[in-house]
Image (tube, helix red, strand yellow):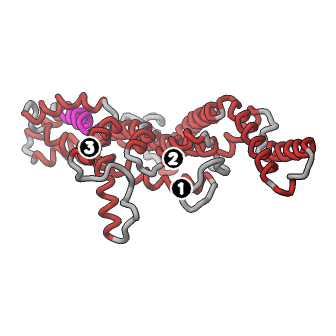
Amino acid sequence: MMPRRSWGRDLRYLALYLVKRLLALLVTVLIGVYLTIVVANMGGQVDELRRVQIRSEAFEQVRADPAFQEMASAERNALVERRVALEVERLRLDEPFVVRSVDYLQRAMRLDLGRAEQMHSDAGSRRVSDIIVERLPATLLLFGTANLLVFFVAVGSALWLSRRYGGRVDRLVIALAPSSAAPGWFYGIFLILAFAFLVPLLPPGGMVAAPPPQGLAYAISLARHMLLPVAAMVLSSIFVSIYAWRTFFLIHASEDYVEMARAKGLPSRLIERRYILRPTLAPIITNFLLMLIGLWSGAIILEQVFNWPGLGSLLFQAIGFRDTPVIIGGVVIFAYLLAVTVLLLDLLYALLDPRVRILGEGRGGA
């Protein structure tokens, strides 16, 4: 007879599993963020451009200041050099790039993201954390809405199609499944062309109307601006999700235990919920979270297409301005979002799939 396991032992195995997964994800995030630091600085070449910019700004400041007009040319040049040296020291450009890159990595992982060089928040702050916090809710709202819509619509549609295998709608979904190979921004371009220009029913981009309305009008304006980007993301993943999950349901519907339940005369709804839907939750959630990771990866282009003021468009703008702190900060936040998604995937799969033993079953022996 199997001994009864204590809650303490279960929690110990669960904690050990989580620690292992967190360590693996931490290493992945560290590597990704450090590579971003190196690429964003072009291996230190951006520092040379920054020195040139510092020298040019210092020269213009000295030349434009009336107090220094009477100074000799050599004295003005010496003053410029002193100002350049002070600014270079303040920005630590006199230190080797490798040393500074490691320091950047440590501060980035602590979310101590420093100050932006070119950009600022709508409130005027140059703190990278303030800039990101201002943009992050828009991204979470847009992608959260689209993904929840895809999940519930796809699960419901897949269940419905599994009862009508081989029908016209089923064949139509199979035919449309390859359309999910195109990313959301691809559909976004055509949706903007169709519903914002050819038939001007919806705004082509932005988050709300300008100037922003108040109260209920703000919510209505937000919903209208969300329709096209949400529709683009849904179109890019809905058909393949319905097809994949409908296949899961069909496979499990042919299992012996389902046939036994039907032979017992159990209601079809109960059979679907208890004997088909429950066993397929693990692969469905796995598929859904992997799809979510893919959508996170396409956030930069999608938000730029719809001029959505989120984290993706912020990162795109930061690349254009060569604002290294904002680039690193945006990548760190995306890396953490992806890491949390993967951790949820591992944890939910382990909890839902009895074949994944994280609570120590089968380890203690008989």
Does residue 279 appear in the picture of this structure? no
- In whole angstroms, how far apart are the C-alphas of marks 1 and 3? 38 Å
353 in relation to 83, above or below: above
Q: Position of residue 4 (x, y in %)?
A: 43, 46
- In whole angstroms, how far apart are the C-alphas of marks 2 and 1? 11 Å
Residue located farthest toward the front when viewing the structure as drawn: 70
Label 3 amino acid? Answer: Arg
Label 1 amino acid? Answer: Val
Q: Is residue 267 left or right of residue 195?
A: left
Does residue 251 appear in the picture of this structure? yes
Q: Is residue 278 left or right of residue 34?
A: left
Residue located farthest toward the bottom when viewing the structure as drawn: 215
Q: Quadrant of residue 124?
A: bottom right
Residue identifier under label 1: 133
Task: Point out the image quarter for the C terminus.
Answer: top left
Q: How many marks?
A: 3
Q: Is residue 30 left or right of residue 98?
A: left
Give the number of the mark in front: 2 or 1: 2
Residue identifier under label 3: 278
Secondary structure state at the residue bearing disc 1: helix
Magenta stretch: helix, strand or loop mostly: helix
User: Magenta region: which residues?
Assistant: 233-251
Which of the pair 132/189 is nearer the observer?
A: 189
Residue identifier under label 2: 314
- In whole angstroms, how far apart are the C-alphas of marks 3 and 2? 40 Å
Residue beneath the point at 29% across and 44% down? 192
